[in-house]
Amino acid sequence: MVVVLWRRARQRSARRWAVLDGSNILYWQDGTPRLDPVREVLRVMTAAGYDCCVVFDANAGHLLFGRYGRDSDFSARLGVARDRVMVVPRGEPADPFILTAARDANAVVVTNDRYRDWSAQFPEIHRKNLLVKGGFDGGSLWLGLPDPAATA
């Protein structure tokens, strides 16, 4: 019994976190805001051993649904738990929410944003392997995931 609990604890501690910049990833596939790229990034990151959360700008719902989208709207459409999705408050930029979550969880950030405007407040954006770039090439997702040994 102790061995099973130890293995479970080890598996939990081995999990890595990723914060997905949902509003950035929306545009990855063809430049049109769509949830499909976010779904695919969630699938690949989860398969790679990451626990993921997704953060969206307040206007993301308007872009996708023609109205304000709540956390629950996005979680239902993405098929993830509601506590893994955040739509930032109206009038607030998502960037500091994303970077704070990444700092607090020691997570990577999946985005093509470089967050240069936030470098004074979040100097860790210059740390190697924090920001994971990605996109679609020939319809296939590519991600610049760090080597797991480099982030351990």
Image (spheres, grey):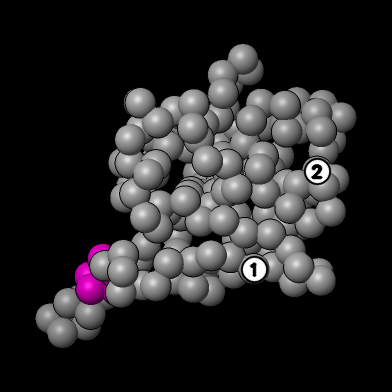
Would you call the spot at circle 1 few (<14 residues within 10 Å), some (14-19), or many (20 or more)? few
Q: Quadrant of the C terminus?
A: bottom left
For mark 2, give the secondary structure: loop
Q: Position of residue 80 (x, y in %)?
A: 60, 54
Q: Say whether residue 145 is magenta.
A: no
Question: Which is more toward the observer, 122 or 59?
Answer: 122
Farthest left residue in view:
2
Give residue 100's mark.
none
Q: Which amino acid type corresponds to the residue marked 2 in the rendered image? A: Pro
Instruction: Evaluate whether residue 81 shows in this view.
Output: no
Q: Residue at x 60, y 48 (%)?
A: 112
Q: Which amino acid type corresponds to the residue marked 1 in the rendered image? A: Trp
Q: Main secondary structure of the magenta part?
A: helix
Q: Residue at x 58, y 41 (%)?
A: 113
Mark 1 vs mark 2: give the one in front.
1
Q: Residue at x 72, y 26 (%)?
A: 59
Q: Quadrant of the N terminus?
A: bottom left
Q: Which one is earlier in the sequence, the residue at label 1 or at label 2?
A: 2
Q: Quadrant of residue 82?
A: top right
Instruction: Evaluate whether residue 54 shows in this view.
Output: yes
Say left or right for 143 vs 78.
left
Quickly name the residue at label 2.
33
Question: Marks 1/2: CA distance?
Answer: 18 Å
Q: On screen, 5 above or below 124?
A: below
Q: Are marks 1 and 2 in contact (CB under 8 Å)?
A: no
Question: Which is more toward the observer, 2 or 152?
Answer: 152
Q: Position of residue 44 (x, y in %)?
A: 59, 69
Q: Residue at x 35, y 26 (%)?
A: 121
Quickly name the residue at label 1.
142
- What segment carries the magenta color? 9-14
Q: Position of residue 138 (x, y in %)?
A: 81, 71
Question: Which is more toward the observer, 105 or 114?
Answer: 114
